[in-house]
Amino acid sequence: MKGFLSEDDTLIAIRNCCRKASKVKAALALITLSGLRLIEEQVQQFLARGGEFQLLLGIDMATEPDAIMALLTLQARYCKRMTIRRFITEAGSTLGLFIEARTPCRDSWLIKSNVGRPRPEL
C-alpha cells in the first residue's frame, strides 16, 4: 500500500482492508463525521466478526470533535479489538508526538469535556 493516499483511495483501501483482513492499521491526519460515516458500516462489520482495528489519528488539524466522539463510541462497543492513538504536533514544531494514554476497556484517551477545548500541556 502507498504511504499517502487521496481521499478516494483512502476510502477504498479502508473498505477493502475491512473486508479481507483480520487486522487493520490506519493512520489519518484528520477525520470528519461525514468521512467516518462512509466507512463506519464496514468497520463495524469488521470488528463484529473479530477483526482488530488500530487507528492513529491527527487531532490538531481539521478533525471534527463529533467524529472523535463517534470513534470513541465505536471503540467502547469493541474495546478489546479497537485501539485509537492520537497524533499531536506541538506549536512551532515540525515533529509530532504519538500518544496513547489509555488501555482497552478503560478510561478513554479523550473525554467529552475536553472536546473543543485547548489541549492540556503534556
Image: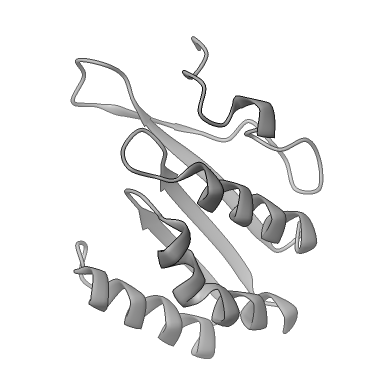
Q: Which colour scheme is used?
A: one colour
Please tell me which residue is depicted at 56% across the width and 82% down the height of the picture. 42
Instruction: Between residue 77 and residue 116, name the one nearer to us.
Output: 116
Residue 117 in the image: x percent, y percent? Answer: 51, 21
Residue ID at (48%, 75%): 39
Q: Residue at x 68, y 75 (%)?
A: 47
Residue 22 seen in the figure: no
Image spot of residue 19 (x, y percent): 52, 89
User: For residue 58, what is the image quadrant?
Assistant: top left
Q: Which residue lies furthest to the top in this view?
A: 121
Q: Is residue 20 above or below residue 117?
A: below
Left of 60 or right of it: where is 82? right
Q: Is residue 20 visible?
A: yes
Image position of 94 with respect to 91: above or below = below
Q: Position of residue 14 (x, y in %)?
A: 41, 76
Residue 96 vertical position relative to residue 9 in the rendered view, above or below:
above
| Residue 23: x %, y % from top left | 56, 73
Q: In this picture, is 3 found above or below 110?
A: below
Corner quadrant of residue 74: bottom right
Q: In which quarter of the image is the N terminus?
A: bottom left
The residue located at (52%, 13%) in the rendering is 120
Q: Left or right: where does residue 29 sit relative to residue 41?
A: left
Given residues 1 and 105, the one toward you in this image is 105
Q: Total marks drawn?
A: 0
